[in-house]
Image (spheres, rainbow, N blue to C red):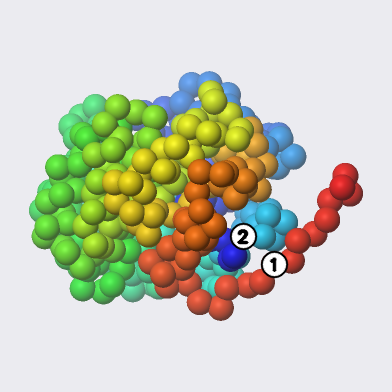
Amino acid sequence: MKIIDSHAHLWLKQDTVVDGLPIRTLENGRSLFMGEVRQMVPPFMVDGVNSAEVFLSNMDYAQVSAAVITQEFIDGIQNDYLLDVARRYPNRFLVCGMCEFRQPGFLPQAKELLDRGFRAIKIPAQRLLLKEGRVMLTSDEMMQMFHWMEERNAILSIDLADGYMQVGEMEEIIQECPRLKIAIGHFGMVTREGWEEQIKLARHPNVRIESGGITWLFNDEFYPFHGAVRAIRRAADLVGMDKLMWGSDYPRTITAITYRMSYDFITKSQELTEEEKARFLGLNAQQFYGFTDLVELPYIKNMSE
């Protein structure tokens, strides 16, 4: 099967502020993260640069043909770099542009991003619960942007706050923009109360769920993540396996596991059929995002084998 990662990140340097707290790249894969030093990426990434080339090396080794690159405010806005990545590696990456959604005036930014060649827009909606007031996904400016995206066949990639807090807003968006393709990340924040309400949004024909971060959410359980497999099985019962897509949340998740481990717990599971595995790991994403000319990647034997 050809595997597609529906949720990964790239950046040259972290240098931003979230909720008034700084996030800065340090050394040896560490970052100053909102008041404490955290291992942001594996320690061998000594300069903290999370580049496309390093990711491609991981992808080739793990036999992952393509990836969707999302964005998050904690990494800073990476539009210029990601557009360059997409131009250099068009058959390996689909990149999401991101606006400064925490302040009014983002609609012109979104239009510019689509004009520059982005095919998708990312909203880290869990970061919109600001101290100074919540940014509603159904605000006039948001709805104008969603209609604009719908008209241009752009994809909305969105991570929601825990549980059902923003589900009602998403229902309104889906009703207003029934042709807007939407991918909901972090598998509905699967380990949090009310996660199934996010999954049920995929009962609408234009909505998909991707599993970026699922190994992080089940980190206490750890590999081979039996609870994550059961959650995938439960979500498939709710909306159908054809609505679910694998995502890794690379590179943060590979501080604990290897990149291949972020999906091979699926391939080794006895709880899913081979057809279900193929759909979850690649076919659904290929159809939803429109990937073509996917590369064939041979298995390279390890020195330890």
Q: CA distance from mark 1 to mark 2?
A: 8 Å
Residue, far bottom: 293
In which quadrant of the rendered view does residue 160 lie? top left
Q: Quadrant of the N terminus?
A: bottom right
- Residue 220, labelled with which disc? none
Q: Nearer the viewer, residue 52 or 155?
A: 155
Q: Disc 1 marks which amino acid? A: Leu
Viewer can see residue 186 = no
102 with respect to 40 (left or right): left
Q: Disc 2 marks which amino acid? A: Val
Q: Nearer the viewer, residue 194 or 53?
A: 194
- Residue at x-position 46% and y-position 26%: 34
Q: Is residue 243 above or below residue 296?
A: above
Q: Nearer the viewer, residue 220 or 31?
A: 220
Q: Which residue is mark 2?
A: 64
Viewer can see residue 10 = yes
Q: Which residue is mark 1?
A: 297
- Residue at x-position 50% and y-position 77%: 292
Q: x, y (%) of residue 132?
A: 20, 29
Q: x, y (%) of residue 88?
A: 59, 72
- Residue at x-position 48% and y-position 72%: 291
Q: x, y (%) of residue 124?
A: 34, 44
Give neighbour class at mark 2: few <14, some 14-19, many 20+ (Cα, 10 Å). Answer: many
Mark 1 near mark 2, Cβ–Cβ under 8 Å? Answer: yes
Q: x, y (%) of residue 241?
A: 39, 55
Q: Is residue 82 above or below residue 11?
A: below
- Residue at x-position 88% and y-position 44%: 304
Element carrying mark 2 = strand
Element carrying mark 1 = loop
51 with respect to 292 (left or right): right
